[in-house]
Image (cartoon, grey):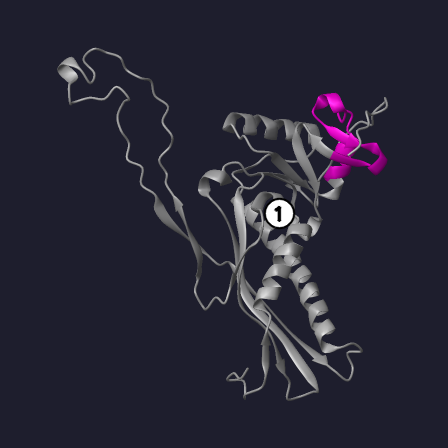
Amino acid sequence: MATENNNLPVRIYQKQFIAMMQTVFGVQSTFTPTFGDLQALDGIQNNAIAFSVKANDVPVAVGSYNTDPNIAFGEGTSKSNRFGPMKEIVYSDIDVPYDFNWSFNEGIDQFTVNTDLDSAVADRLNLQAQAKTRLFNGKLGTYLVASAAADLGAVDDVNKVFEAASERYTDLEVVVPVRAYVTAEVYNAIIDHQLVTSYKGSAVNIDENGIVRFRDIVVTKTPTRYMAGKAIIFSPDNIGRAFTGINVVRTIQSENFAGVALQGAGKAGQWISDDNRQAIFTAGTSATTTTSTVKPTTTTTTSHA
């Protein structure tokens, strides 16, 4: 197809790259449990807004049914209601903006690539999807830390920190699974803690030296570079959304070498409502975390996944 690029032939790969990005993100993104599947849009222009969501700030009121004889009847006829005062529910539109952009620009010379061009393009698009997922990991970790309602302090004892988090989630009446993204240092401290037994609300697989839960909070070991300086990020599952809009992904015949330029550009971002941010907490710093734990003196119960 001809474009304004000096009438050089162009092949478009937006739809393929969207599918690849969503697949790779689902498998490789550290924070998929919190943000769910990657939302992707094709062919966006220079718009600043990714999408709008419907929301309202009216709390759910729990009242009692009033059977007073002068409510809705008698003196209250046509002037009162036994269900209590009526609140109007109005949903407002919240615009969600893009937060950052991404691009890539690579050259594939048919004389030096040592494989056919189609295979090279497919391989590079897959690697670009993986690179963008790592970019997302860093952005999402930073966003979670910035959105946290409170920091629970230093991780001098992982048990105390998880106790504090558990108490907060109980008081908040969070009904979905809660997850703790932790550095390798904290993860190892949990593995070695004396309370890591199946009857203490934990689940362990000794054969794999892995832990699934600690104090009924799901534990996910996370690379330090995605933790934005924190040792632990607590977050309920599926409370936010991650999204990307793709301007273009294409190959275009090069005038400078015998091959094609592989190019792509897009925008991306993430969103968690203000209400849901009240259920995000952090703890410790990844650089100074200390863990005073005691090694178990008895055999830990083994569970096989």
Q: Answer with the quarter of the image where residue 192 lies.
A: top right
User: Percent from the top left, x then y, of residue 63?
Assistant: 34, 21
Q: Name the residue: 78% across, 82% down.
A: 112
Q: Nearer the viewer, residue 103 or 155?
A: 103
Quadrant of the drawing holding the C terminus: top right
Residue labelled with disc 1: 32
Q: Is residue 28 magenta?
A: no
Q: Position of residue 226 (x, y in %)?
A: 66, 51
Q: Position of residue 162 (x, y in %)?
A: 65, 30
Kindly tell me whether residue 157 is visible in this rendering: no
- Is residue 77 positioned above or below 196 on the image? above
Question: Considering only vertical position in the picture, is 274 above or below 113?
Answer: above
Residue 169 vs residue 92, the one in the foreground: 92
Secondary element under disc 1, as helix, strand or loop, is helix
Task: Decide: is 42 above or below 80.
Answer: below
Q: Amino acid at mark 1?
A: Thr
- The range drawn in magenta is 186-211
Quadrant in the picture for residue 156: top right
Front residue of this view, candidates 175 and 83:
83
On the picture, is 163 further left or further right than 82?
Answer: right
Q: Give the number of marks.
A: 1
Q: Position of residue 230 (x, y in %)?
A: 64, 44
In the displayed orientation, state which residue is furthest to the top. 69
Q: Residues within 10 Å of mark 1 (few under 14, many from 20)?
A: many
Q: Is residue 261 left or right of residue 305?
A: left
* Residue depicted at 58% across the width and 39% down the height: 237
Up/down of 300 relative to 53, above or below: above
- Answer with left or right where residue 67 lies relative to residue 289: left
Residue found at the far left of this picture? 75
| Residue 92 relative to residue 10: left or right | left
Residue visible at 38% across and 30% down in the picture: 60
